Image (spheres, rainbow, N blue to C red):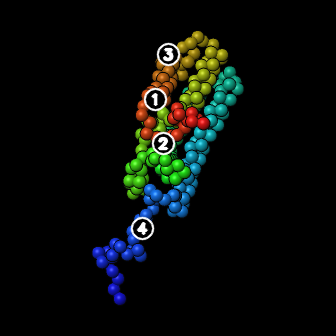
Amino acid sequence: MTSKSAKDVDPTDASHREVGQGLLEEDMGPSSAAAHLYRGEIHRMKFWRERLDQTSYWAIVIMSAILTWTFSSRNNPHYILLLGMAALTAFLVMEAKRYRGYDIWRGRVRTLQKNVFAYGLDPSAGLEDPEWRRKLSHDYRTPTIKISTEEAIAHRLRRVYLLLFTIMLAGWGIRIAAFANRPWPESAAIGQIPGLAVTIAVGVFYLTALFIAIRPRIWQAEDELRSKDVGRHR
């Protein structure tokens, strides 16, 4: 007994319909398949969210340990705080890479929330994006990172790291002003590196981080909590 080839299959035969045909049509609510899909995307998003939180946690722990050790004795060098800022920068870059991966799963979750569940609850509001099926299908076929490294760094600076850098910079300034025997900027010297050069380098670094964090941009990341309209319709 020979099997039918793809050309011999009758497209009107219900037993040979394409997989997924009829899924999430305009006139139907979220199917069980969509519910399982949504649950899977939530799980992946939660996993990547936990990875972000772990990086932030260790950055805060290391910052606290360095600040505690530096201020525990007058003889401890101030440049340890600058090494701490370098460590925070490494954590920032690492977390930005993880955030770019996290945005893939969160983008899918938000697409389903806005165009499936929100539409199913209130069809009168219309669809958020009429092309959402095509875009989501393409994303499943070819997953792509949707935000740049610079945008990911800006997001993590706004959420966590700009505050940590500010605390470390303030601690560095207080440490030098409180325990140094020489006036500023000579007291900021590190070995043969003049204090003025160290101060300029630290200032340029902080201003660069501040500029990346606050400069106007069109955000590509899916972040519903960044909208100014959050809570206005309550």
**Which is closer to the viewer, label 4 or label 1?**
4
User: In front: 97, or 17?
Assistant: 17
Q: Which residue lies furthest to the bottom in this view?
A: 1
Q: SS for tag 4?
A: loop
Task: Answer with mark 3 or mark 1, whichever residue precedes in sequence.
Answer: 3
3D distance between C-alphas at marks 4 and 2: 29 Å
* Quarter where residue 39 is shown: bottom right
3D distance between C-alphas at marks 4 and 3: 68 Å
Task: Answer with mark 1 or mark 2, whichever residue precedes in sequence.
Answer: 1
Label 1, on which residue? 212
Label 4, on which residue? 19
**Which is closer to the viewer, label 3 or label 1?**
1
Q: SS for tag 3?
A: helix
Q: Where is residue 112 in the image (x, y as percent from the top left)?
A: 49, 51
**Which is closer to the viewer, label 3 or label 2?**
2
Asked if disc 3 and disc 1 are in contact, CB closer than 8 Å, the reply is no
Task: Bin the neighbour count of mark 1 within 10 Å (Cα to Cα): few under 14, some 14-19, many 20 and up.
Answer: some
Give the amino acid at mark 3.
Leu
Q: SS for tag 1?
A: helix
Using the image, tell me which numbered label, if any, was put on residue 10.
none
User: In front: 210, or 197?
Assistant: 210
